[in-house]
Amino acid sequence: MTGQSVWGRSRQKNAAYHARVVRDRFDWSGFRDHRVPFQDMVIYEVHVRGFTRHESSGVAHPGTFAGLREKIPYLRQLGVNTVELMPVFEFDETAEERIVDGNRLLNYWGYNTVAFFAPNTGYAAGSEPNSEGAELKELIRDLNANGIDVILDVVLNHTAEGGEHGPFFSFKGMDNNIYYMLTPDGRYYNFSGVGNTLNCNHPAVRQFILDCLRHWVVEYRVDGFRFDLASILGRGEDGRPLSRPPLLESLVHDPILGHVKLIAEAWDAGGLYQVGSFPSWNRWAEWNGRYRDDIRRFLKGDEGFAQAAALRICGSPDLYPPERRRNASVNFITCHDGFTLHDLYAYNQKHNEGNGHGNTDGSDANYSWNCGAEGNTRAPSVLALREKMQKNAFAVLLCSRGAVMFLAGDEFGNSQFGNNNAYCQDNEISWLNWNDLTRNQPLFRFVCALIAFRRQHPVLRGPTAPAACGWPDVSMHHGVPWNSEAGPQAHQLGILFCGRNAADDGDDAVFLAVNAHWEPHTQQLPQPPAGFVWKLRFHTGCWQPACPWLHPEDLCLDMPPRSVAVLTWSAVRTDAQTT
């Protein structure tokens, strides 16, 4: 695409979009396509512009593919192995430009596709034709060279042409009746919430989508796709859900797309919610919205969610059968849509006044808690509690079975100042402030250590070979050993993952203890096999270098209010062995 290469520069009203064909001379020699297994993924959701646009990012090319590429050493330090890029297909950020309280608002997120085969020109650092394509390929090549896969967030449920009053520049002029779902009176079905809905299961549209995704796999070598409002992809031409949607089945069996990851946002704006029931053919994974909601409510202290939280941590066996469980659930507590993790524990209500909709936009079901003060505060006790709550969330997330995802900046306490729908905020509300990385080093180091710990213990990611000790793969110890009942008023969980670790061919066990209550509790630990003792690895309630709260003599662990602990087995050493 040409004609709008400078981010935020408004196009002339009613101006046409222009495209040009360029020769691709990109050299992929030496490309490493290692394909991270699904259950091993630690996904980092990134907005290309917002990740480095702030002056504190310290990059030479802020807000671009090249700027993100400069941050690869940081991603390696953090330990993530998959980056999920928010929309990078060409979109017009100025399409709905407006001024609110003196601030210029744009279509910042990019869920407003103009061209499905072209990278967004506004993310280019260079000015040569197709520099954005070369820079995106360089980014993908170098991420893969550093062990990091790339997933694209794709918007195939609607287009930037909008509804009846939207512009005409593509499908409306080609064949409106084929490319969009229309009501009997000729209006647009709006299952997307933004004016129109692509008629995804019409043969012509289905072929277009297949060609599009093949293009990104073949030409850009991406490792998978996250499908925005994916339930729309399963609707028929009359809008009704199909039992075997042709598009979804075609994607599963396509020879080019057969190895890439397919991740569904398994709901849409028309009320269709398919978490746990999205048509899968054992190939489609899902953003697990049930995980997000149940874990949020349990960690903030709501009653009646302990049992649900235990199920989510164990891979949601109530949602996914055994044959799907290893490749089904993308567990997350935060994403671009909603509060950041910091704001989840800093605000009781959303604060979207700056969006210009009278604070009516964005979800009201945030399940957040401000820890005693709304928004900014200098109260040391509130700030300490907020940090602990963020650590609790990360500890639970990274000790849960299934793929893991979190929002860029959560690892160092990034805030959007209470805005839970910052789709239009191209400013410091949405840009990562890298000064927070310096201010919140303890949180950052904690997250890095947890990611490394998850990598070292495969039992956290999925079932392994049975442990020689004979203990089950997963067992519950809520408060006391072998207690599998978490009653309606329970605020405490104890979950043990056990199996073989192929790295040393020995037994591996990880115990996750959670006290989401505002009162202290104790956690009794099961007696480990002969020759082993419990070793405390993490404790969010312990601020001392040597935590005194594990009592080996009676297998008891002190759990202060609102704390999470992680333990493993450690072999008993003889006097002749070094410690």
Image (cartoon, helix red, strand yellow):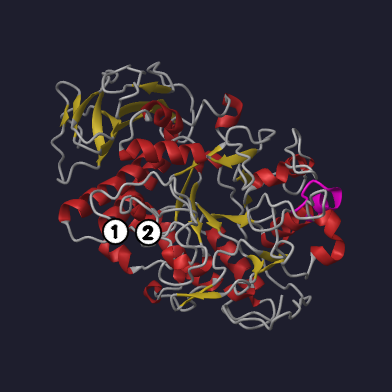
Q: Which residue is labeled 2 in the image?
A: 418
- Residue holding disc 1: 375
Label 2, secondary structure: give it.
Answer: loop
Numbered range of the magenta stretch: 198-208
Question: Left or right of 495: which side holds 62?
Answer: right
183 part of magenta stretch: no
Res. 303 mark: none
Residue 456 showing in the rendered view: no
Relative image position of residue 343 (x, y in whole percent): 35, 55
Please state which of residues 353 and 417 is positioned toward the viewer in this rendering. Answer: 353
The image shows residue 4, relative to residue 404, as above or below, that is below
Badge 1 crowding class, 10 Å Cα cut-off, few under 14, some 14 to 19, many 20 or more, is some
Q: Residue at x 22, y 48 (%)?
A: 385
**Image-based side of 375 in relation to 322, left or right:** left
Q: Dividing the picture into quarters, in which one does residue 437 lie?
A: bottom left
**What residue appears at the point 33 percent right and 48 percent down from the top-left corner?**
449
Three-letter amino acid code of the residue under disc 2: Gly
* Nearer-N-terminus badge (1/2): 1
